[in-house]
Each structure stands twice: as structure tokens, then as C-alpha cells.
Amino acid sequence: MPVYKAPLENIRFVLDEILKAESLTSLPGYAEATPDLVNQILEEGAKICQEVLFPLNQSGDKEGCVLENGVVRTPKGFKEAYKTFAEGGWCGLASDSAYGGMGMPMLVNTVMQEMICAANMSFGMYPGLSQGAYEALHQFGTEEQKNIYLPKLVSGEWSGTMCLTEPHCGTDLGLIKAKAIPQDDGSYMITGTKIFISAGEHDLTGNIIHLVLAKLPDAPEGVKGISLFVVPKFLPKDDGSAGPRNGIACGSIEHKMGIKGSATCVMNLDEAKGWLVGEPHKGLRAMFTMMNAARLGVAMQGLGIAEVAWQNGLLYAKERLQMRALDGAKAPEKAADPIIVHPDVRRMLLTCKAFCEGARALSYWVGMNLDISHKHPDPAVREEADDLVALLTPVIKAYQTDMGFEVANLAIQIYGGHGYIWEHGVEQYARDARIAMIYEGTNGIQALDLVGRKMPQHYGRLLRRFFHPVSQFIEENQADPQMQEFIFPLAKSFAKLQQVTAIIAQKGLKDPNEAGAASSDYLRLFALVAMGYMWGRMVKAALAGAGGGAKAEFYDSKIKTARFFFQKMLPDVDARAKAIMAGGETLMALEAAAF
């Protein structure tokens, strides 16, 4: 049976010693988010993830969701777990206190997302989708819409969805066919079919609030003609309770490779009643509010799955006895040595460990900047933080989900044949992790977003938001003898990133296919440099805290893991840079018919 324990010591290290998250208490509305309170919240969050959600992960995978008479039944225990989750206030952890939320920083919510996804990714889809719906309505909804829906979403009494994809279009939303016809009472009658709708139908809440993309009769072609509508499953009554059934229903559920405890639905809208959210034909902007929140959430899915897979791989490597160590027996009293003595097993374990700890620091840094972008009183500081979040969102979404799958795959490899068997649990992590590389914008789309939109935006301003702190960190620490073994490879890789950035920008102006051909390699190279920057910051903190004491072993582990990252993982930058330098000609030369 698999295990999971929330990595609270590593979480506190990032929050307290790397990010100095206590500084968030100076932002408006966050005065109560002291380290003591945040620590208490995360300890309680760890308990619910470990004791309530995690025990349902494997059974939920085995049972899956069932559609009966138009209603989806979630796996046994999910309904009770959701009730406990909602009653604990977890649905509104980072939501506006004006609507009943706890009002905690998004950084705290980011940490909680990691633990939820590690414990039970399928379960996490339900409150995760509600968070996206909440964000869109909170930013773009009318006061009436906010008052009707936000308190219910925050309390968890109602849940939310994003209804974007249609059978003929996914990424290219300009092709959607769903139609919205204005009515005399200010509402709209919406007709169409949406597919791949996570949490589109289930038995966890009394109502489901769908945010639906559709086109008005006078809509211009393409993405400029998209509008956003709120379409509840049950129409709200005057007293705020759920009333008569609306014309939106689940036609079927998908039978998927993974996240089987999450209902993925085909939703049919037959003159369903909805209300416009935001301005006509401006739904793309509101949709991106949901999508960006979702992409950060999916990045945390990659990290969460990696963390739980790595924990189980480590446990197995310490217990499984096979052969003797190459340099002599390490457990002579036993029939064989534990497989953790073998170099290749250590390579896999250290890859998992280095990724999880580095990605945690990187994604929490993004979460903290999200808070700064929303709350800081200085507009210039808000802009700087918002730029950094916009730049790094596609990076962490793609890299962390790629690596989430890779770490799950490595865990299976560590287990050997036992990893391929359902009972041991790790094969589920690979199946669950795989979807994160696809939904909320495939990782190829994230790479194109980075190269095609974020890189040139505001004449490279977004890039400078990242380049400047990395450059400053290198300059401040390059003369420190203890830091040089880490700073020099970081500086070399950072120089490669700057070099290929200039080359892609130059070539892309002449031929867009050159930028497209380089995009995936560029995103991975960018992510590795970002990870190197965070590992450098962690090494500096570990060196400052080293020198004996209760955490001496913890800090020593950080420094040794950093050496592995810089010597064994960061050099992939060189290979990626060479591939980028080679250009895109070989990708585009072969005629389609010749494949």
C-alpha cells in the first residue's frame, strides 16, 4: 500500500528561510497571516490530506465515477470527505473574507494545493475547478452575480466548472459553436455541447455553477467573438437557494487513463439559461483569469504527484533487498543489500528529490509574487510581480507536469515489476500525472506561449523581471568561496539562456517556424535555469543555517542534493542550447506525405 506524509519541514524551509513569507503580513488584508497562524493552517491541512483524502485515492481510482440517470456518483467516501473539507473552510482558504473566505495569501493556497494533489489528485479537481470559477466571477462578475454565487462557492455548498472545450476545438477556442441568444429579461438562452468538463456533474454539492464560453448572434469571427456566461445547474431562487433545473445536463462521462475519481463530462446545453459575465465579446480575458489560475494549479499537480511518487520510491528503495553493493556488502547480516546502495537507483532517487525540492521553491516563489501582484500598495511593484507570474506560469505548468510524470515513471522503475502492479499504488501516479501535461493548454502550447507571447511582450520587459534577480544573485555570491561551486554553473547556464533568447528573437522575426521549433527546448532550458536559481538560494540559506544543531542533517542534505542538481541535471541546458542553435530546418523539411 502506498504512503504519503506532507513534507512540512521542507515547506517551512522554503516559506521561512528562502521566501521570508512573513513579509506578506505587511500587505493590505494579510496582517493576520503570521508564520504561527500559517503553520497551524498547514498542519491542519496536512492532517486532512493524510487522514481523509489520501486513504480514498487508490479506492477512488479502482471504483471511478458512475453516471446514473443523468447524475454522476463519485467514488465511495468522496461525498463524506468533501463535506469534511468544506466544513473546515478549505474551499475558501484564499478567498475574499467579504464572501466568507479565510482571506489567506495565495501562497498558502499554493502550498495546500501541493498537499491536496499529492494526497488525492482526483478529489482535488472538484474544489480546484471551483477556485477558477470563483476567480473569474470575483474579478468580472456583477455585484449581483458575486452576491449570489461567491458565498456558495467559498463555503463549498456549491461548486464550479469551466466549460470551454467543444468536440471540434480545444486550444483554438475561436472555433467554438455554442450560441447565446439574448432574452428580454437580460438573460441568454445557450445551446451547444462542451466536452472534457472536469467536475461537470457530481453528487458532492447542491448546485454546480458552470462558466460557459459561447458566441452572441452578432459576434465577430475568432477569439474576438467569445463571451463568457454563468450557467447554474439549478437556477437560484430569490432566497439564494437552488431552484428549478436548468437546461444543462451531463450526456456521458469519459473513461480515462487516470484521475478516475474525477468526473470528466460531456455537457449538453439545450436553451440553458445563463447570464453574461463581463462585457460582450470579451470573454477571452475573463477566461484567461480562470486559465491562469488553473495552470498554476496544474503545476502544483505535477509537483504533488512527484512528491508522493518519490516518497514511495524512497521507502521501497530502503526496504527492498537485491544483490550486494558494488564496493562490498552494506548489510552483511541480511541476505542482500537494500537497493538504495546501487548507483543507478540513487540516480533516480536524487533526480526525484532534486526536482521536488527545487520545484517547490520555484512554484512557491510564483505564488508569493501572485500575492504581491494583487495586494502591494505600489503600482510599480504590483506590475513587476504580475510580469514575473505571467512569465513563469507557462514555465512551471509545462516543466513541473513533464517532471511529475517522469518522477512517477522513475518510481515505477525503482519498484521494478512490483511498480507495474496496481496494488503497490505507484502505477496510478503515472496514469494520474499524464493528463496534467495535456489539459489547461498542452505543454507544447505553454512553450509557444512563452516564446511567442511572453518573451517579446513589452519589448522583453517580462524577461527582465526574471533576468535581473538572477543576475544580481550571481553577482552578489560569485566571490563567496562556499558558493562558487554552485554559482559558476548557474552563471554559465544563465549566459546560455540569454544567448539563445537573443537568437530565437532574431530568427523568429524572419521565420515564425524557427521560434516554434525552438520553443519546447527553450522552455526546458528556462526551467532548468530557474531551478538553478532557486537551488542557489536554497544552498545559501542552508550554508547560513549549517554548523551543528538540530537541523544540521537537514541542511547538509540540501547542500548535497544541490550538488547533484548542478552536476547531473543542470548540464541538460547545454544539450537544449545546441538543439536550439541547430534551428528548425530539419523539423520543417520533410513533406507531410513523406512521414
Image: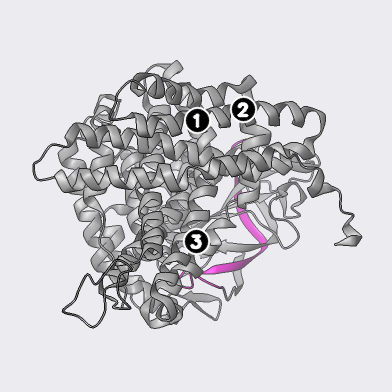
Residue 237 makes an appearance in the image: no
Q: Residues within 10 Å of mark 2 (few under 14, many from 20)?
A: few
x, y percent for residue 373: 43, 28
Image quarter of residue 219 = top right
The residue at 24%/72% (across/down) is 329
Image quarter of residue 361 = top left
Which residue is labeled 1 in the image? 492
Residue 14 makes an appearance in the image: yes
Which residue is labeled 3 in the image? 405
Q: Secondary structure at mark 2?
A: helix
x, y percent for residue 76: 36, 79
| Quadrant containing the N terminus in the rendered view | bottom left
Q: Is residue 445 above or below residue 281?
A: below
- Which amino acid, mark 3? Phe
Q: Is residue 176 magenta?
A: no
Q: Nearer the viewer, residue 112 or 433?
A: 433
- In the image, the segment drawn in magenta is 257-279
- Which amino acid, mark 2? Gln
Q: Secondary structure at mark 1?
A: helix
Q: Residues within 10 Å of mark 1 (few under 14, many from 20)?
A: some
Q: Is residue 265 magenta?
A: yes
Q: How far apart, in angstroms, are the residues tagged by discs 3 and 2?
A: 30 Å
Checking the image for residue 499, the label placed there is 2
